[in-house]
């Protein structure tokens, strides 16, 4: 890999997209209860068992080598589920029991994680934390009840396999949606890396070669993987997918940021986005021209097809300079081919503060029972390391919590790059939204999230920039009695 110039999403630029630098923060009045620290003798709490009995939907996903063709004149061999890229769309009804048999035809270990779904711990798919990784030629069955409804995705949780194509969308349809729409399209954005992903340090790039070297430890920038483009549903902009609509339709788009290291700014030219769900959870609809989201985040938006023509669904990398990912929204009344219209300005942008969950998260009112104050930073020294409170996972202390506590995590980002932080097994409240992944802006950006400890087990809490995760930016949250 050729180390790039340091490139970081400036705080100002991210704030333009996201809004305030402090979210849900109750400055000065967060209680400072100690973590368990040294009295770590608490015994583990038994996780809830997963469902047994008959599944409503049974799927098998085989992970193997395969070729993809992101544009007509480009193909590459990568790792895939069912030979497809993205992997097959899994779609079930809220409350259905889903059973997925993972068959590992790779010559490496693998797992599947159900990103955002608060599954029982045993089927969360995190190697060495919730299960032994599935060996080559082996298989493993994940069975769980698909709830709550929402737009999710699934992906390998081993090393950098997510950036090698092992991902796919998971839609859990609500039985009673809070907004009306006629049909939906799933839109998976991704960054395109032909070949095998590697950590910068694997290239012997050392601290100094990685960009920002002179700035010292935690303030150092980052290096972007050598992406060769940006994808919508596996396609480069040279060969964009098309979404057909009819004038008068209300179309629900389920946007998924399945990238490994990209913050996308998303818009549809000529159309407003009525954002209806954040990370799958219903919000009071908010009309914007665009939104930004980090790796692991999802937004659903209902678009009214009232402006016949041919339009770009476009996602710009806010932290990269590849040409934008593009699909084309086309009205079927069009006679003859028209060139899609290119976006001009980005207009009004969604901010986290605009999001109001339709139903508040239970059990997170008032003063938390336990608060963790965590700093996010770049590790000092030669190797490529990212840390939470100075520790790089797996050499990092677990964060211990008791069942049923109201837990608060406050994060301060001492690095110049954004960290999309994701919590397994739980939704959290951030501001008035309910989410499972939240961007913490660079340059001392702060975010506070609150959750109820209602799903015992050992859960990963980590940056969803895959390279930051692989380089240590993770902790296990562990329930103890
Ligand atoms: Cu998308 Cu640890 O997960
Ligand atoms: Cu990060």
Image: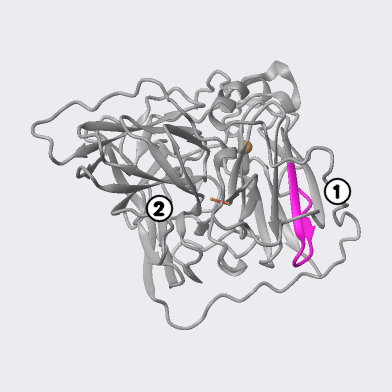
Residue 309 vertical placement versus 361 (above, below): above
Q: Residue at x 69, y 68 (%)?
A: 456
Residue 213 vertical placement versus 29 (above, below): above
Q: Quadrant of residue 11?
A: top right
Side of 124 relative to 68 (left or right): right
Q: Identify the element where label 1 is drawn.
A: loop
Residue 478 x, y percent position in the rendering: 74, 61
Q: Residue at x 41, y 42 (%)?
A: 274
Residue 474 x, y percent position in the rendering: 68, 47
Q: In the rendering, which numbered label is found on residue 12?
A: none
Q: In the rendering, which numbered label is found on residue 31?
A: 1
Which residue lies under the disc numbered 2? 168
Residue 64 vertical placement versus 385 (above, below): below
Q: Nearer the viewer, residue 202 or 63?
A: 63
Q: Residue furthest top?
A: 214
Q: Which residues are magenta?
A: 395-410
Q: Residue furthest right?
A: 39
Q: Quadrant of the C terminus?
A: bottom right
Mark toward the viewer: 1 or 2: 1
Q: Residue furthest bottom?
A: 53
**Is 355 included in the stretch rendered in magenta?**
no
């Amino acid at each position: 890999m050729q180390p790039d110039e340091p490139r970081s999403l400036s705080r100002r630029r991210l704030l333009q997209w996201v809004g305030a630098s402090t979210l849900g923060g109750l400055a000065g009045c967060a209680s400072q209860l100690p973590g368990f620290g040294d009295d770590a003798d608490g015994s583990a709490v038994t996780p809830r068992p997963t469902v047994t009995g008959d599944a409503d939907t049974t799927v098998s996903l085989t992970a193997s080598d395969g070729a993809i063709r992101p544009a007509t004149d480009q193909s590459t061999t990568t790792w895939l589920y069912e030979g497809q890229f993205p992997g097959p769309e899994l779609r079930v009804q809220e409350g259905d029991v889903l059973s997925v048999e993972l068959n590992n035809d790779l010559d490496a270990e693998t797992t599947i994680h159900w990103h955002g779904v608060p599954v029982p711990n045993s089927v969360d798919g995190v190697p060495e934390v919730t299960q032994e990784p599935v060996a080559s030629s082996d298989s493993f069955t994940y069975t769980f009840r698909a709830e709550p409804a929402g737009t999710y995705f699934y992906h390998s949780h081993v090393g950098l396999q997510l950036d090698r194509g092992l991902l796919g969308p998971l839609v859990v349809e609500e039985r009673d949606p809070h907004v009306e729409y006629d049909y939906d399209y799933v839109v998976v954005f991704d960054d395109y890396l032909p070949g095998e992903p590697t950590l910068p340090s694997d290239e012997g790039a050392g601290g100094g070669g990685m960009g920002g070297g002179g700035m010292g430890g935690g303030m150092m920038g980052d290096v972007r993987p050598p992406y060769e483009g940006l994808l919508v549903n596996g396609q480069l902009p040279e060969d964009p997918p098309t979404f057909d609509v009819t004038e008068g339709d209300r179309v629900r788009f389920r946007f998924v940021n399945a990238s490994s290291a990209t913050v996308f700014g998303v818009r549809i030219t000529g159309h407003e986005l009525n954002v209806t769900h954040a990370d799958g959870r219903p919000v009071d609809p908010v009309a914007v021209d665009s939104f930004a989201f980090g790796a692991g985040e999802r937004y659903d938006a209902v678009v009214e097809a009232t402006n016949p023509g041919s339009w770009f669904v476009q996602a710009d990398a806010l932290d990269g300079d590849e040409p934008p990912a593009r699909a084309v929204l086309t009205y079927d009344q069009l006679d003859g081919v028209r060139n899609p219209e290119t976006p001009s300005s980005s207009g009004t942008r969604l901010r986290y503060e605009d999001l109001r969950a339709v139903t508040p998260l239970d059990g997170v009112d008032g003063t938390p029972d336990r608060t963790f104050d965590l700093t996010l930073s770049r590790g000092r020294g030669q190797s490529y390391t990212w840390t939470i409170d100075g520790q790089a996972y797996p050499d990092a202390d677990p964060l211990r919590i008791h069942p049923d506590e109201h837990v608060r995590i406050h994060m301060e980002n001492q690095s110049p790059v954004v960290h999309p932080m994701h919590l397994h097994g739980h939704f959290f409240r951030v501001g008035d939204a309910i989410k499972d992944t939240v961007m913490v802006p660079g340059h001392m950006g702060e975010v506070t999230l609150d959750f109820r400890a209602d799903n015992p087990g050992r859960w990963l809490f980590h940056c969803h920039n895959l390279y930051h995760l692989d380089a240590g930016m993770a902790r296990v949250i562990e329930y103890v009695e």
